[in-house]
Amino acid sequence: MLRYLLLLAFLLVAGDAAAALDAGLVSKLAHGDGDGKSAAIGALVASGDPQAAVLLKALADGELQTAGPRVLIVKGESATDAATGEAVTPLPDAREDVVANNRLRRELDSAMAGLRIFAPERAVRAASIKELSGNADDSMRPLVKKALAQEKDPDLRAELAMIAASLDLKSADRAERLAAVKLLGASGNPNSKSLLLGLVDKAAEPDEEIRGAAQASLHTVEARLARAQFAGLVFSGVSLGSILLLAALGLAITYGLMGVINMAHGELIMIGAYTTYVVQNFFRAHLPGAFDAYLAVAVPAAFAMAALVGMALERSVIRWLYGRPLETLLATWGISLMLIQGVRTLFGAQNVQVENPSFMSGGVEMFPGVVLPFSRIVIIGFAFAVVAGVALLLTRTRLGLFVRGVTQNRAMAACVGIRTAHVDTWAFGLGSGLAGLAGCALSQIGNVGPDLGQSYIVDSFMVVVLGGVGQLAGTIYAALGLGFANKLLESWSGAVIAKIVVLVFIIVFIQKRPQGLFALKGRAVEA
């Protein structure tokens, strides 16, 4: 940080080598009592003089000394006059350290933050502004105003304007306070609401005009915050809906199209997540320079691994249980327990961490206080890309034609030469592979553990049943609708009550409309 301050001092005073600090302030800082030193710090900061940063830094680092009335900045065996900046040779023998107590050090930290808002590096200025926010006192008002006039970055200007407005609210000048109130009303900073709330009470603000302006600004700010909150709620709903959609899409095929109640569907999601974890570790160990590309390998690997497990499950167990839903439920539930225990044996019972690629780190601030994480944005796009791929597969490929034919009329499909047993295996593998893709996506937003799938199996069945058995479009609408409903109810009543309300709604809805949102149509169904 000293490098930044020295560079700042050089840039600002290079054209005026004779510039000097106020000798009286320098003397008060070194020889004054506690209150005198505090006043000197405030005055130095308010002056905005770049040499003040060097002086205060020397005091904080224990490099400020006195030699009689003279104040020196001593570094090793060299010294400069703190007021004039001139070199002092030889170094005086009789010197005393200027000691800063804890109170003075706190004030120095705040003062140094104030002076760093002139640093050439944006990151340093941003950190200084963040440190000043809520901690700036009236002595820093001239410094903040000066920095506001010089700042070119729009985001930092907005934050500086908020600090300046909060300081102007305490001003004795009525016009300054009124201007600050109007500025807060136009600001998008959520903190402006708390500042304005203190001005609408007659006991806190006797001036009627300022109270009225504060009330109007408060209404404007509250309306803006409500819009931002609703936008954040919509995004959270779509994000949750896309996750439910990924988790339920495979089940929409294995249960919706094939009629198999697969209680191991959640464990297929878990297999996809652990496959992503293994691929990540391989890239970290053997291809660290290409780590960000691991997801491009993990996606097909997760699909393939889950699909292979699903096809093995169908060929060995489920093919003997078609038309017997209760036996299928019990058998797949037992298999799910076996898969969970197998993963615990291989990877341990503790959760494992999957790291996001760099392009999925961070987020974009849509509104002040509403940040959309890149990881969620990517997952939303990925979910809809998967849906589009499945729709094309089912409607534009030979396998999709066979799957739809076997689903609608197995006997007639067999009569025209379709090998229905093979179609069942491929269809179950497709549904299982989609569950693996869901696990790959889920690994990017949370820890991966043996019980990962248990958190989504019930929600997946709710999405499929609500959307309509065998209906891909119904699955999409149900997933997004349930995601938004969950987030909306959570904002009102909490996560637990939201889950209960959604479950009760689905139960009542299915009682009234057993076929779900979208019902299958055709002579085979009606028969």
Image (cartoon, grey):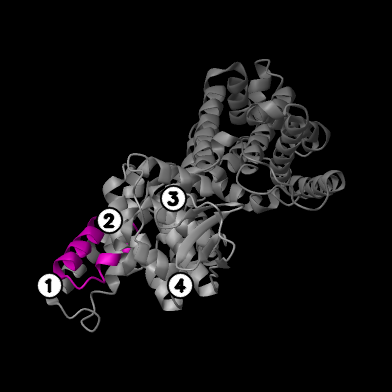
Q: Which residue is mark 1?
A: 209
C-alpha distance separating marks 4 and 3:
20 Å
Viewer-side label of 4, 3: 3
Asked whether the residues under the numbered discs 2 and 4 touch, taking CB atoms below 8 Å apart as contact, a structural biologist would say no
C-alpha distance separating marks 1 and 2:
25 Å
C-alpha distance separating marks 1 and 4:
47 Å
Q: Secondary structure at mark 1?
A: helix
Q: Amino acid at mark 4?
A: His
Q: Amino acid at mark 2?
A: Lys
Give the dominant element type of the magenta stretch: helix, strand or loop.
helix
C-alpha distance separating marks 3 and 1:
54 Å
Q: Secondary structure at mark 3?
A: loop
**Disc nearer the start of the sequence (2/3):** 3
Question: Observer-nearest residue: 136 or 62?
Answer: 62
Q: Which residue is mark 3?
A: 86
Q: Amino acid at mark 3?
A: Glu
C-alpha distance separating marks 2 and 4:
30 Å
Q: Which residues are magenta?
A: 167-192
Q: Residues within 10 Å of mark 3 (few under 14, many from 20)?
A: some
Q: Which residue is mark 2?
A: 145
